[in-house]
Image (cartoon, helix red, strand yellow):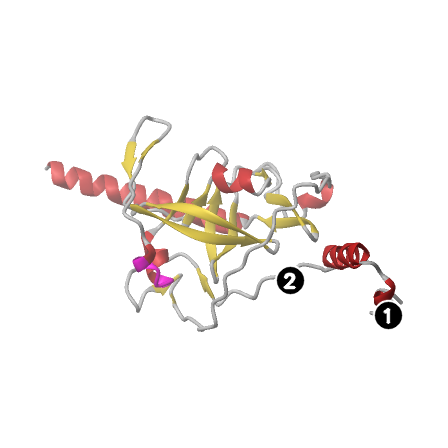
Amino acid sequence: MMRQGHLKELLSDRGRTNFARGREQHQVPLKPPSPARTIHMIIGGGDDASINSLKFTTSHKLKRSITHERYDELEESIIFDKSDTNGLAFPHYDALVITLQILDTDVRQIMVDDGSSACIIHPRVLTQMKLEDKIVLHCITLIGFNNAVERTSGEITLPVVAGGVALETIFHIMDQDTGYNAIIGRPWIHSMRAIPSILYQVIKLSTPWGIFNIRGEHRTSQECYRITLDCTATQQMRDKEKEA
């Protein structure tokens, strides 16, 4: 009867406080709204950009900021087993490529790279999301495996939503020919306490609703790899033409 609102007048002030806290703890956190749009691989720029030969369209919805508390006391075990191999062919050497909700947009063709110390996003994605005015002109230098030096053109902070949990994430902006829309690196992976498995093509994280799985898209991964190879070959041809 107490939970139905009866007999509360019999409680002391301290009892009422404890009762209110108990009710708050039993409330289930609200899940975020559905994304307003989806961004695939962007081939061209501008309002008439084509995406995988399809026209880009946006359904305008009310934007809402979403925040959730991190649940530091969750003790659920994250395991990988045979059920994670459904739909996979072994051996494979595919990168882990997923779709994530960034702000109010589903962004596809995001590579999960736990070897990267930064999260990267392509500027054309921000153009499609109409977020150019949110870019901060703070540039950093990134060094690759072969000591190749790349300079970013700015950064932007955006909420990345996974399993109902939103994390404000700093993305560094790089305008490079690539098959990926973004790269999710260690800052997001570690902050979310996520466990990626490239072998099983899945990333798992603990949420207030239990363990949440984000399945990799291995066919998309293969497509991104082919696009990246084509972009590299094209860039090499341009460099040779400049030298000539």
Q: Residues within 10 Å of mark 1 (few under 14, many from 20)?
A: few
* Percent x, y of residue 157: 41, 50
- Give the quadrant of residue 201: top right
Q: Is residue 76 left or right of residue 131?
A: right
The kind of residue on which mark 2 rests is Leu
Q: Quadrant of the C terminus?
A: top left
Nearest-to-viewer mark from 2 and 1: 1
Could you say whether the residue bearing mark 1 is in a helix, strand or loop? loop
Q: Is residue 183 left or right of residue 84?
A: left
Q: Residue 30 has which mark?
A: 2
Could you say whether the residue bearing mark 2 is in a helix, strand or loop? loop
Q: Is 129 included in the stretch rendered in magenta?
A: yes
**Which residue is denoted by mark 1 in the rendering?**
6
Q: Is residue 105 above or below residue 91?
A: below
The kind of residue on which mark 1 rests is His
Which stretch is magenta? Answer: 128-133
Taking the spot 60% from the left edge, 44% from the top edge, the residue there is 202
User: Can you see residue 43?
Assistant: no
User: Can you see residue 184?
Assistant: yes
Viewer-closest of 44 and 213: 213
Viewer-closest of 51 and 39: 39
- Earlier residue among tags 2 and 1: 1
Q: Are marks 2 and 1 in contact (CB under 8 Å)?
A: no
Q: Residue 139 has which mark?
A: none
Q: Is residue 176 left or right of residue 101?
A: left
